[in-house]
Image (cartoon, rainbow, N blue to C red):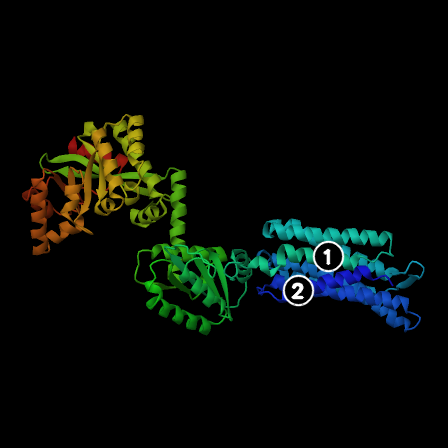
């Protein structure tokens, strides 16, 4: 008997089983199917040897038994082929909602082929001189047909769903199929060369080392599962599985890496890694250098570990100056639609809570998800509005108390949605500031203001300048002055017709960059106002430090002036000091004649508010000026 090839295949599979069994594994459906392929290939090789033995000793054992053994070997080939198809089907199951029906059809087809194998005749042959044994007959052709159909199905799956299959996985399965096709062709041409079973074992080996080796899913530095493993696990978890799960995430802030022979990363991080590795009823993934996710299938266990995390933050971990961990508990990860969105949610919460220094543990619920989704929706609306030029400017007139006419206006940004409705600034300004899009919005507004002033010759309407707001993010842009000066040069805008408004918070952020920008533009001819004085961290030092010409009293400060004696004294004192420095004052939020008269009485220079006009689109603003200043 010549069974050297089969024995080599068995040794190869057994060796792989030792390696496979000694490593930590993810419990993925596709991986479990691969295990089935693994052991089915081993069974196939054993049956290959037994079939050769049955052929050689067919005169010593019942003929039906010998035929049964040979046909069982053929059936094992069909089994391996079917499992290879199921392996690919489960790999793309998260994109195929009816994949279970396909698998059921594959099983039925394999069953039909199996019945044919056992029902059709098989003939056994032996060449004693060349030490060979083989079979032929209709049962063999049924086997070849069944295996060929499964190979074709697999090739169709690989190419039809290639965008859902990892490139390396697709490549290795193609190699496996090629080995089978080559071995089957050789064996059909020369049925004395029994190499199909060995080709199957060789293909399984290639898949093991290229894709299903558990070591590929491990971060070798920490022992945790890596990001590749997380993507495979997350795909299956979010593919329609109804099994509940719970997630605890830990992120390390201000990481300063410390390397030694016993640990990797910060000492604090390594301690967390070691603890997570010891939690046997959870799965830990290292997503990035500073982020680890822990998945639980039981809520009670997740709650228990979460309590331990809270204790951690309240004791030793909060004292670590570097690599300090923050913990996040996602009670219902199903509130997001995918594993990538889960990571986005965690990053979103971490960014939102970055200034919450004392608290190091946060619970994430559905309301935070709704907030994130709304911000993403609004971000998309901002992008579309910028692309389709639906960012517009409204103008609120500012009244000169001394000249008794409107001499300036504040430019206010608005966005129009696709239905033609206005999106109020409160709905998008903070979002645009957080994602940096406010820089492009501000630039677009400034261009439109300059164009409006020049095109309509607003100076002929009595308008001396337009006030344009600068956000905190814009003030931290060291190229701001260059950008705005270039715009004014292109439009041939008189810089004295522009007054840029900064806020107190803006002056706190990147103060030197802001002052540098201000000095450059003031030298060019632009003037500045300090907006919203009276809110936040009000301090007259802002006025002293900032080279501004106008100070704007916030609406809340104005309203407080009329309702609180203390606020009245504070505002009177601030007003006298500001006037003493030679600066003008604008009172915002004036809504009644009584309020206006009082501002006139206390020598406020300019007033702005609904008493005079609400913010107006360009054409209505021009008509307003014609009527009021004409």
Q: Residue at x 19, y 39 (%)?
A: 529
- Asked if 508 appears above or below 371 in the picture, the reply is above
**Mark 1 and mark 2 residues within 8 Å of each other at the beta carbon:** no
Q: Which residue is mark 1?
A: 202
The answer to whether residue 254 of the structure is visible from this angle is yes
Q: Nearer the viewer, residue 384 or 73?
A: 73
- In the picture, the quarter occupied by the N terminus is bottom right
Instruction: Relative to 437, say whether 256 is above or below.
Output: below
Sequence order check: which comes first, mark 1 or mark 2?
A: 2
Q: Residues within 10 Å of mark 1 (few under 14, many from 20)?
A: many
Q: Is residue 154 left or right of residue 552?
A: right
Viewer-proximal residue, 577 or 534? Answer: 577
Number of residue marks? 2
> Taking the image as drawn, is residue 79 in sight?
no
Considering only vertical position in the picture, is 209 above or below 115?
above
Residue 35 shows which numbered tag? 2
Residue 263 percent across, percent down from the top left = 46, 60
Label 1 secondary element = helix
Left/right placement of residue 323 relative to residue 577 reads right
Q: On the picture, is 301 further left or further right than 92?
A: left
Give the Cα distance between marks 1 and 2: 14 Å
Residue at the location (93% across, 62% down)?
Answer: 128
| Image location of residue 335, percent across then percent down | 45, 62
Is 53 positioned to the left or the right of 235 in the image?
right
Q: Position of residue 93 (x, y in %)?
A: 60, 58
Q: Nearer the viewer, mark 1 or mark 2?
A: 1
- Residue 58 occupies which quadrant of the picture? bottom right
Local crowd size for mark 2, using a 10 Å CA cut-off: few (<14), some (14–19), many (≥20): some
The residue tagged with tag 2: helix, strand or loop? Answer: helix
| Residue 327: % across, % down | 39, 63
């Amino acid at each position: 008997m010549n069974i050297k090839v089969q024995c080599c295949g068995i040794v190869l599979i057994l060796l792989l089983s030792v390696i496979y069994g000694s490593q930590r594994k993810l419990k993925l459906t596709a991986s479990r199917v691969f295990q089935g392929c693994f052991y089915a290939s081993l069974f196939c090789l054993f049956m290959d040897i037994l079939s050769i033995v049955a052929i050689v000793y067919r005169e010593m054992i019942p003929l039906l038994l010998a035929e049964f053994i040979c046909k069982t070997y053929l059936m094992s080939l069909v089994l391996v082929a079917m499992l290879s198809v199921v392996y690919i089907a489960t790999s793309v199951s998260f994109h195929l909602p009816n994949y279970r029906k396909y698998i059921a059809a594959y099983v039925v087809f394999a069953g039909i082929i199996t019945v044919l194998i056992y029902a059709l005749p098989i003939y056994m042959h032996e060449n004693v001189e060349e030490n060979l044994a083989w079979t032929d007959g209709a049962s063999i052709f049924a086997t070849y047909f069944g295996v060929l159909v499964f190979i074709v199905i697999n090739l169709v799956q690989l190419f039809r769903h290639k965008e859902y299959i990892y490139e390396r996985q697709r490549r290795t399965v193609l190699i496996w199929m090629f080995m089978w096709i080559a071995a089957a062709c050789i064996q059909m041409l020369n049925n004395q060369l029994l190499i199909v079973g060995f080709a199957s074992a060789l293909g399984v080996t290639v898949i093991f080392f290229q894709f299903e080796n558990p070591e590929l899913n491990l971060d070798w530095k920490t022992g945790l599962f890596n990001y590749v493993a997380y993507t495979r696990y997350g795909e299956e978890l979010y593919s329609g599985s109804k099994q509940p799960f719970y997630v605890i995430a830990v992120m390390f802030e201000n990481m300063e890496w410390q390397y030694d022979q016993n640990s990797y990363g910060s000492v604090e991080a390594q301690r967390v890694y070691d603890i997570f590795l010891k939690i046997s009823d959870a799965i830990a993934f290292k997503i990035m250098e500073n982020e680890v996710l822990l998945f639980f299938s039981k809520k009670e266990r997740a709650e228990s570990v979460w309590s331990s995390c809270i204790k951690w933050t309240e004791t030793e971990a909060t004292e670590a100056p570097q690599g300090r961990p923050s913990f996040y508990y996602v009670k219902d990860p199903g509130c997001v639609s995918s594993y990538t969105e889960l990571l986005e949610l965690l990053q979103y919460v971490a960014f939102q809570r970055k200034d919450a220094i004392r608290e190091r543990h946060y619970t994430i619920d559905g309301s935070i998800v709704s907030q994130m989704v709304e911000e993403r929706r609004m971000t998309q609306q901002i992008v579309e509005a910028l692309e389709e030029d639906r960012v517009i400017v409204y103008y609120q007139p500012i009244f000169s108390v001394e000249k008794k006419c409107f001499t300036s206006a504040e430019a206010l940004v608005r966005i129009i949605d696709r239905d033609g409705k206005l999106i109020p600034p409160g709905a998008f300004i903070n979002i645009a500031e957080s994602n940096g899009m406010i820089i492009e919005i501000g630039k677009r507004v400034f261009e439109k203001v300059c164009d409006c002033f020049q095109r309509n010759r607003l100076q002929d309407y009595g308008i001396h300048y337009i006030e344009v707001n600068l956000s905190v993010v814009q003030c931290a842009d060291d190229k701001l002055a260059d950008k705005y000066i270039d715009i004014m040069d292109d439009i041939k805008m008189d810089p004295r017709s522009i007054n840029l408004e900064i806020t107190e918070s803006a002056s706190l952020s990147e103060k030197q960059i802001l002052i540098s920008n201000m000095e450059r533009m003031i030298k060019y001819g632009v003037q500045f106002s300090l907006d919203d004085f009276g809110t936040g961290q009000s301090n007259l030092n802002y006025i002293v430090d900032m080279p501004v010409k106008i100070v704007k009293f916030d609406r809340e400060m104005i309203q407080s002036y009329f309702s609180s004696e203390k606020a009245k004294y504070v505002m009177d004192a601030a007003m006298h000091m500001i006037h003493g420095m030679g600066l003008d004052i604008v009172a915002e939020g004036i809504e009644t004649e009584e309020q206006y008269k009082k501002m006139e009485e206390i020598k406020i220079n300019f007033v702005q508010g609904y008493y005079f006009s609400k913010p107006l689109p360009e054409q209505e603003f021009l008509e307003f000026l014609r009527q009021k200043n004409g």
